[in-house]
Image (cartoon, rainbow, N blue to C red):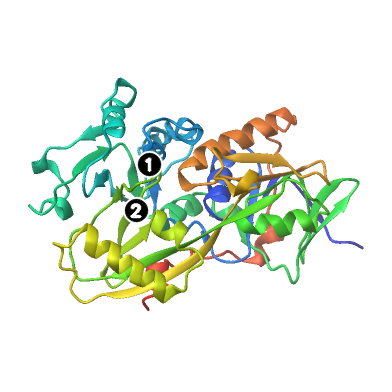
């Protein structure tokens, strides 16, 4: 006799923000959805995020809207609705690190960008600050630039992952690919586990860079994936004030993006991204740290950070392939070419997770997939459940 068969509406592979948000939204709609993760929930790209929920202003530093800024502009309001328990997903248990995010220039913005920020188009999204309202790190008389407050907010990503996982813990399972496998039968993707064969009406691949291998395991070639590498810098220091900001530079993307975190021992860490991380993606770690030190000394010479420890973190962002490896403008959902019941999805950035789940719902509706009868998931219980991933500021400074 073969393994017992378990029929579900949806099986999701990948327990980062894309998979967890989608699991919550679909189960809240009545779908029998289950999720499988081979490592820890949120591991790799999600847990390495700076936690920014932004509305695209950082893509408008050239003084004009881009496609990405149009797609993302509604996201902060959607996330805030969920944080208040009024959205499609309940995030009331998620910790908000900061309700404010800042944009500043250590000299001054170009007249074109300043005029754009003051335009009616950005009213309510960008607020130019008077000096008494500057965030603490910019209150020095030595700071001669300009500062703005954005509608963006910053979340504590581990608490976000836990908030999503806790609400549907009964449908989240660990998967060991040495004992489990994907196979195809009559153009239908199946998941074989040690105790049963799972036959989902739709399989969703939300495993970030892991999607590439999963598509190949199904015999597929499309949708193709690209990797956009970056190398973030972390500095553990003794300066007590937090800072959540973009510093503008000469290009249309932030020169430096700073978010503040604390280790499990309460030690302050600044997490540095922006052009520093993208342009330094292929640099040796010590060389990038030297560049980061120089940036901090040039941009904020008045801050005494005390004794510092520096680390770097390399990661690849998994995304649908674009011409010239450009950044995708919005969340992506596409059909795997080798089977009839599998979708692959990338949010492309944390902020767009709600957009991704909506796109998945639309794709399911187009395929005629509606919530089915309840399913007993007992055959999956022996697989166990994954933990939440450790933060990089704890693992790197342990």
Residue 197 location in percent, x, y? 80, 57
Which residue in the rendered view is the most extreme toward the top? 120
The x and y percentages for residue 184 are 86, 52
Q: Residue at x 15, y 68 (%)?
A: 304
Tell me, yes or no, if residue 212 can be seen here: yes
Residues under numbered marks 2 and 1 in contact, where contact means CB atoms less than 8 Å apart:
yes
**Count of all numbered marks drawn on residues in the image:** 2
What quarter of the picture does the N terminus occupy?
bottom right
Q: Residues within 10 Å of mark 2 (few under 14, many from 20)?
A: many
Numbered badge on residue 58: 1
User: How far is the residue under mark 2 from the one under mark 1?
Assistant: 10 Å
Instruction: Name the residue located 36 percent from the left edge and 32 percent from the top edge.
Output: 63
Q: Which of the two residues, 349 or 278, is positioned nearer the viewer here? A: 278
- Where does the C terminus fall, quadrant-wise? bottom left
- Residue holding disc 2: 257
On screen, residue 14 above or below 150: below
Q: Image quarter for residue 117? A: top left
Residue 309 picture location, percent across and down: 30, 76
Work out whether residue 287 or residue 260 is closer to the camera in this orientation and state it: 287
């Amino acid at each position: 006799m073969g393994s017992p068969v378990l029929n579900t509406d949806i099986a999701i592979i990948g327990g980062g923000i894309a998979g967890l948000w989608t699991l919550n939204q679909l189960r809240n709609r009545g779908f029998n959805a289950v999720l499988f993760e081979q490592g820890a929930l949120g591991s790799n790209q999600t847990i390495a995020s700076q936690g920014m929920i932004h509305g695209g202003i950082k893509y408008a530093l050239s003084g004009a809207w881009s496609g990405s800024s149009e797609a993302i502009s509604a996201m902060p309001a959607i996330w805030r609705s969920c944080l208040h328990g009024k959205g499609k997903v309940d995030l009331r248990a998620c910790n908000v690190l900061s309700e404010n995010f800042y944009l500043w220039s250590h000299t001054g913005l170009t007249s074109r960008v300043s005029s754009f920020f003051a335009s009616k188009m950005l009213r309510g999204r960008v607020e130019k600050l008077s000096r008494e309202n500057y965030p603490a790190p910019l209150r020095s008389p030595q700071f001669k630039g300009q500062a703005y407050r954005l509608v963006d907010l910053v979340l504590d990503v581990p608490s976000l992952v836990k908030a999503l996982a806790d609400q549907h813990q009964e449908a989240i399972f660990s998967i060991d690919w040495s004992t489990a496998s994907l196979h195809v039968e009559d153009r239908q993707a199946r998941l074989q586990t040690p105790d049963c064969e799972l036959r989902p009406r739709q399989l969703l691949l939300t495993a970030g860079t892991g999607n590439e291998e999963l598509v190949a395991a199904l015999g597929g070639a499309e949708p193709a994936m690209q990797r956009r590498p970056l190398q973030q810098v972390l500095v553990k220091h003794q300066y007590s004030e937090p800072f959540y900001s973009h510093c503008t530079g000469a290009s249309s993307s932030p020169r430096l993006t700073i978010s503040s975190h604390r280790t499990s021992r309460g030690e302050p860490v600044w997490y540095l991204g922006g052009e520093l991380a993208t342009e330094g993606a292929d640099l040796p770690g010590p060389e990038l740290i030297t560049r980061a030190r120089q940036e901090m000394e040039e941009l904020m010479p008045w801050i005494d950070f005390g004794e510092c420890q520096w680390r770097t973190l390399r990661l690849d962002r998994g995304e649908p392939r674009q011409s010239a490896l450009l950044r995708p403008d919005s969340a992506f959902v596409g059909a795997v070419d080798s089977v009839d019941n599998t979708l692959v999805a990338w949010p492309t950035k944390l902020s767009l997770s709600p957009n991704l789940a909506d796109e998945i719902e639309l794709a399911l509706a187009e395929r005629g997939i509606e919530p089915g009868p309840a399913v007993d998931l007992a055959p999956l219980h022996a697989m166990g459940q994954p933990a939440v991933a450790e933060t990089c500021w704890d693992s790197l400074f342990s």
